Image: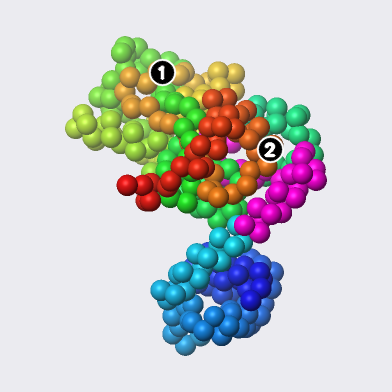
């Protein structure tokens, strides 16, 4: 048994039991991976996968336990490397962040600028995706930190910490009739085509819930994955936009007017996620404190030490 076999095993599972995809991701050959997995199964004396011909269709019960143990072993090996790196060179390493477009575009730039000034020898890698993708990348260890508004708390493998609350605004072209409506109402909004976030993104559920509670069916004509696209189509006159308040820049968005909508929608909470049982480098704690000043080392450690929701009781 060796670490390479454990990595191959986890890669196959992470790629939907597609050995070819796992081999491509690991820059190796499909026959090589298959051979190593067979050798591991022979050594353990159990079948890890259910097979139909050459195709893997599922994990066996024993296989599920093997994969879970393999993940823990690989995580602890990575922890050992991090411990060594921390004490050998505290200010050198990589910080991988998985987040949504809104966070990457509007919230993180000043944070990362301060972080880079403090740790010029730490490479920052940004992965962008929807909240589910952010959570998945963090669970897999492709990201050290996940930042999103939704989905993170649904993963027991992750410790999540609340960072800040935010709400939405309505963007309209200058001179739009809605600028004369005070206070703004959902009924008034529903009289116009609406452009907003995709269902998988950034607090869309609160938007839907607000209209549902009023028994109003909004005319959503276009959805997008990020606020910049939404603003582009609002500028074209295709509808009114509902976006996160932090996505409005009065200088860059001079062609648009911002209408407060905090009274119409429930606030959302941006959360930060970390894998449980992972050693955090010192600079990771510093990044977290820069992003959310209330989250000092003690608060982060307490969250990591807390029992996951599935285990509580």
So how many labels did they put on this image?
A: 2
- The stretch in magenta equals 76-105
Relative to 160, does residue 7 appear above or below in the rendering?
A: below
Q: What kind of element bears circle 2?
A: helix
Q: What kind of element bears circle 1?
A: strand
Q: Do the residues labelled 2 and 1 touch (CB within 8 Å)?
A: no
Mark 2 neighbour class, 10 Å CA radius: few under 14, some 14 to 19, many 20 or more: few
Tell whether position 290 is magenta.
no
Q: Residue at x 66, y 32 (%)?
A: 286
Most distant residue in the left direction: 215
Percent across and percent down for residue 120 are 79, 35
For disc 1, the marked residue is: 259
Q: Which residue is drawn at 36% across and 47% down?
A: 312
For disc 2, the marked residue is: 282
Real-space CA distance between mark 2 and mark 1, rounded to the nearest whole angstrom:
41 Å
Give the camera-side residue of 13 and 257: 13
Mark 1 neighbour class, 10 Å CA radius: few under 14, some 14 to 19, many 20 or more: some
Mark 2 or mark 1, earlier in chain:
1
Question: Visible in this render: residue 183?
Answer: yes
Q: Which residue is drawn at 49% across and 77% down?
A: 48
Q: In this view, does 203 lie to the left or right of 71?
A: left
Relative to 45, does residue 141 appear above or below in the rendering?
A: above
Q: Which colour scheme is used?
A: rainbow
Closest to the camera, between mark 2 and mark 1, is 2
Give the camera-side residue of 44 and 123: 44
Relative to 270, does residue 305 appear above or below in the rendering?
A: below
Q: Is the magenta stretch mostly helix, strand or loop?
A: helix
Give the camera-side residue of 217 and 298: 298
Q: Which residue is drawn at 49% across and 38% down?
A: 303
Q: Identify the image quadrant of residue 22.
A: bottom right
Tell whether position 94 is magenta.
yes
Percent across and percent down for residue 155 are 43, 49
């Amino acid at each position: 048994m060796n670490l390479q076999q454990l990595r191959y095993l986890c890669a196959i599972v992470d790629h939907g039991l597609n050995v070819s995809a796992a081999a491509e991701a690991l820059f190796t050959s499909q026959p090589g991976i298959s051979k190593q997995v067979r050798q591991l199964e022979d050594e353990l004396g159990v079948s890890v996968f259910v097979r139909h011909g050459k195709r893997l269709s599922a994990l066996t019960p024993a296989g599920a336990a093997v994969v879970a143990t393999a993940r823990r072993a690989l995580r602890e090996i990575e922890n050992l490397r991090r411990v060594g790196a921390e004490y050998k060179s505290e200010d050198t390493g990589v910080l991988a962040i998985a987040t949504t477009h809104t966070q990457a575009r509007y919230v993180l730039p000043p944070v990362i600028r301060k972080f880079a000034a403090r740790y010029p020898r730490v490479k920052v890698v940004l992965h962008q995706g929807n909240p589910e993708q952010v959570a998945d990348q963090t669970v897999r260890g492709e990201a050290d930190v996940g930042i999103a508004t939704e989905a993170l708390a649904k993963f027991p493998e992750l410790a999540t910490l609340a960072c800040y609350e935010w709400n939405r605004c309505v963007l309209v072209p200058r001179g739009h009739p809605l600028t004369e409506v005070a206070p703004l109402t959902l009924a008034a909004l529903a009289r116009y085509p609406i452009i907003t976030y995709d269902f998988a993104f950034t607090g869309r559920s609160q938007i839907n819930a607000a209209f549902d509670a009023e028994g109003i069916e909004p005319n959503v004509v276009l959805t997008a994955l990020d606020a910049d696209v939404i603003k582009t189509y609002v500028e074209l006159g295709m509808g009114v936009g509902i976006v996160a308040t932090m996505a409005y820049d009065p200088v860059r968005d001079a062609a648009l007017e911002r209408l407060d909508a905090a009274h119409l929608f429930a606030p959302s909470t941006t959360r930060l996620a970390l894998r449980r049982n992972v050693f955090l480098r010192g600079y990771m704690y510093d990044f977290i404190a820069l992003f959310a000043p209330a989250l000092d080392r003690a608060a982060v450690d307490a969250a990591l030490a807390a029992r996951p929701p599935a285990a509580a009781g």
